[in-house]
Amino acid sequence: MKRFALAVLAALVWSVPALRADVLWDQPWDGVSRGSPAQDFTDMDNRIYSVWLFDDFTVPEPGWWIDRVTVYGSEQGDTRYNLGVYLSISSAPHVDVLDVVATGSEVVLEPGEPPLRRRANLEFELNGFYLPPGTYYLSAWVRRPFDPGGQWFWLRTSPTQGEPFYLHNPGGGWGFGGNPVGGGWLTEQDLSFTIEGRSTVRISGTVTLQEYVGDKTVVPVTIEVRNPGSSDSLETHVVNLDEGGRYSFQTLLRGTFDLSAKAPHWLRQTVANVSIAGDVTVDFTLSNGDIDGDNEVTLFDFGALVAAFGSVPGDSNWNPNADMDGDEEVTLFDFGILVGNFGATGDE
């Protein structure tokens, strides 16, 4: 099965401060149910008993960035013989070759010498692994020889969230065969694990392009997310408007930020102190006339308009930024826009 790729967010430049992880999915051990073996034995005499367990979880819109997964278990063996601790996330509850998305560590929480059973969790750091919306199946296991390494058990929990867990025993060592078993053998329960990370939120709104009668959908608008009072961008999103001037993008950021919008021949507008705790709407109204893009309407813009005056697309002196009203011709109407906004300066 193909490895899940980190999602590429269009035109997104990351320079993001450390974020506090949220609990995205939680199935803690119920303190009562015992565990089921989750293992990949390396010794051929016992490979027939290798078992992979799967449990489902659901990612809502617009998706998750996963930082950490903790799988709750118990140990009846010796961790010194571990050859690896693995995590898989798949779109189906059984595969013959598991797709490893992370390697982790086994943390023994209770003292005791092997072969006593004691609490031992598996911990995985994913550091921002993106999953789009959908239903997935998580599997975690310890790889070690059975003799002398013993077994690790994945603790079960009730009640179930979604489907109960699946067992996959390709070697048929317990008579289960290669297909997953749902129901029976206590699989009416869930497996215990926690997923931490961030869910993205949507920033949306409208951008009014003043004095513009052309096609808004071809005008790129650059929106920066900044710390309050700063001109340094934490995130930069180049968005395309729809016919109504609406835009949207996703962000992981939480807190209070300034949002700044700039389009090719419009002045920058900054909306200060926007609280991002969930989906939020921010509207912009951009003033026209900044042909040279320096965020001021000056004699330099006047000179650029004069140089392109009378031109249409295809002419040698055509300058699309001088066509401020978007009618595909540089005319007196564009001259009127520049005169009306002459001397104006955009926000920082």
Image: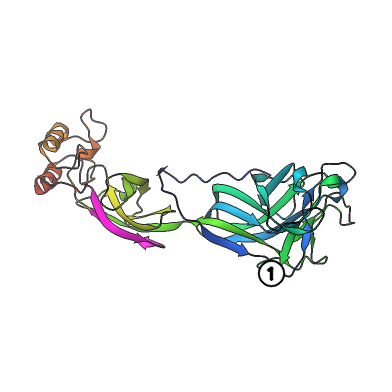
Residue 283 lies in the magenta stretch: yes
Q: Helix, strand, or loop for circle 1?
A: loop
Question: What is the three-letter code of the residue carrying label 1?
Answer: Asp
Chief SS of the magenta region: strand
Q: Position of residue 87 (x, y in %)?
A: 67, 49
Q: Quadrant of the N terminus?
A: top right
Q: Position of residue 9 (x, y in %)?
A: 46, 46
| Horizontal side, residue 208 vs residue 15: left or right | left
Q: Position of residue 280 (x, y in %)?
A: 37, 62
Residue at x-position 36% and y-position 48%? 240
Task: Tell me if residue 171 comes above or below residue 303 in the rendering.
Answer: below
Q: Position of residue 39 (x, y in %)?
A: 78, 50
- The crowding category of the residue bearing disc 1, from other C-alpha atoms within 10 Å (few below 14, some 14 to 19, many at least 20), is some
Quarter of the image for residue 47 reads: top right
Kindly identify which residue carries mark 1.
30
Task: Tell me if residue 258 comes above or below residue 161 in the rendering.
Answer: above
Residue 279 lies in the magenta stretch: yes
Residue at x-position 66% and y-position 47%? 105
The magenta span reads: 268-285
Residue at x-position 58% and y-position 48%? 125
User: Could one spot residue 247 in this view of the protein?
Assistant: yes
User: Could one spot residue 164 in this view of the protein?
Assistant: no
Q: Tell me which colouring the rendered structure shows.
A: rainbow
Camera-nearest residue between 248 and 26: 26
Residue at x-position 67% and y-position 55%? 138
Quarter of the image for residue 285 reads: bottom left
Camera-nearest residue between 233 and 1: 233
Task: Tell me if residue 48 comes above or below residue 201 in the rendering.
Answer: above
Camera-nearest residue between 250 and 125: 125
